Amino acid sequence: MPVVAVALMLGGCVVGPDYAGPPSAAPRAETGAGFVRAGAVAAVSQPRSARWWTSLNDPQLTRLVEQALEANAQVRVAWARLQQSRAVVGGRIADLAPTVGSNAVALNNQLPLKTFLGDRAGEALTGLTGAPVPKSINFDIYNAGFDASWEIDIFGGRQRAIEQAGALAGAAEAQVADTQVQVAAETAQAYVALRGAQRRVALGQRSAALQRETLRLAEQRLAQGAGSALDVERIRSQYENTASTIPPLQAEVDANLNRLAVLLGLEPGALDPALRSAKPVPVPPRSVALGDPMAMLRRRPDVRQAERQLAAANAQIGQAVARLFPRVNLIGNAGWISPNIGDIGTLAASTYTVGPTLQWNVLDFGRTLAQIRQSEAGAEIQVVQYEQTVLQALQDAETALSRYGHQRVAVARLARANAAAARASSLTNQRNQAGTISTVDVLDVERQRLQTEQSLAQGQTEMTTAYVSLQKSLGAGWTSEEAPDTW
């Protein structure tokens, strides 16, 4: 058949633009230049580890993060969406194959013959046969067979649909990775915040206890006529202010316990027995494996997701262009039809139909061209969104590097201040033992030391939180970190 021959010859034609990869959105990063804000961070050239949380050397944190990656609701939803998108790819591939069906029909028919023929025809038929015409006749029809149809993808519309579905599946896979990055970071941040709040509660309670003891001694001195009411009220005000800071910190402890439980797919309170006891805030390693900006962009799941969405939008243009051209279908059916069921399957009752059909919506060109322009605009939107995602990723990484580097400097200064406060407390105790200063003075110096330790505890918490944010900004926290083949 000439039409079939032409269709087969044109079967390799795929209209629409071929995907050429993402645009250049970060020229400086593409040259291999390093991070601008990496100066304050000690970097090493060793390979990055996806399981960055193990570098904090806290086994309990490691267990919590890995349990969250298994049981977190957002991760499970992302996996389900990935399976859904992969099933769509399978469906698009199946669209290339012929559609084959089968049918079987058994009909009993009753024809009102006398009514159908009319009175005069009936009388004439009676005169010819000598027998009265029956009111109706009954007969059976049996039909069984197979039918098939196959749309030949001459201009590649279905190939573009497969390409689009594959790209969207890649975007869904990147979404799984991005969710893992987010959940790992959120779990670590909640754990660090929990340990920091527990430490500050303990320090606040110790500071409040010292101020309460100072208040008791001041009240004794006032009762003995050696003190003043002004000193008593000043110390009482300090004590009440310090004591008032403890309940909000305890509420922060409860909030982070609840947050961790939900991140792990558990009910609030489920982790209280395991985490209620205070432990130190995990400390980041001395150096960080940074890599370079381009490697970070290849690794970040949100950038990979934006790139795959761009590829899908490009394939959508090809699908729209394919609608400008005719569609060719091969249809056919074969089977048997007979009033006798015993004839089904025999050559005498066989029947078949086969041939091509051509469908071309010539008058819809205006609508189709509008759809092409719409698809092209959609692709342009994805280009801009990809470029913005790249710039946002670089901003996240540079900001996280700056915060982490400066926070390390701040913590180093707080550690020196805390050491100086500890030495001052020791000297004050020596002078008190020598009888040169009062116990109230000793308690006041110790209160100041505890305040310095509070600041150090807060600074350490913020430093570890900044380290977690840095790992998140670098796109770490998922297992496979290979770049897409299209890059």
Image: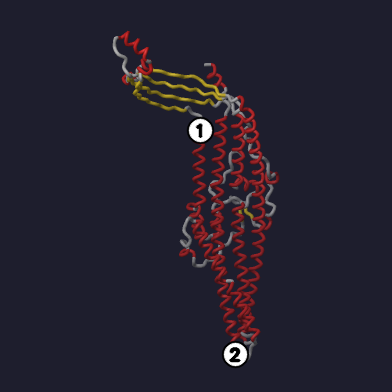
Indicate the position of residue 223 as horizontal and vertical percent values.
Answer: 60, 90
- Measured along the vertical axis of the image, is residue 418 above or below residue 70? below
Indicate the position of residue 284 as horizontal and vertical percent values.
Answer: 59, 60
Q: CA distance from mark 1 to mark 2?
A: 92 Å
Q: Residue 359: which quarter of the image?
A: top right
Quick check: 67 left or right of 370?
Answer: left
Q: Residue at x 48, y 27 (%)?
A: 98
Indicate the position of residue 460 as horizontal and vertical percent values.
Answer: 60, 64
Q: Residue at x 54, y 34 (%)?
A: 162
Q: Quadrant location of the C terminus?
A: top right
Q: Which residue is mark 2?
A: 223
Residue type, mark 1 in image: Ile
Q: Is residue 483 visible?
A: yes
- Residue farthest to the left, as pictured: 131
Residue nearer the viewer, 28 or 341: 341
Which mark, by number, is residue 93? 1
Residue nearer the viewer, 80 or 210: 80
| Dot 1 alpha-carbon crowd within 10 angstroms: few under 14, some 14 to 19, many 20 or more | some
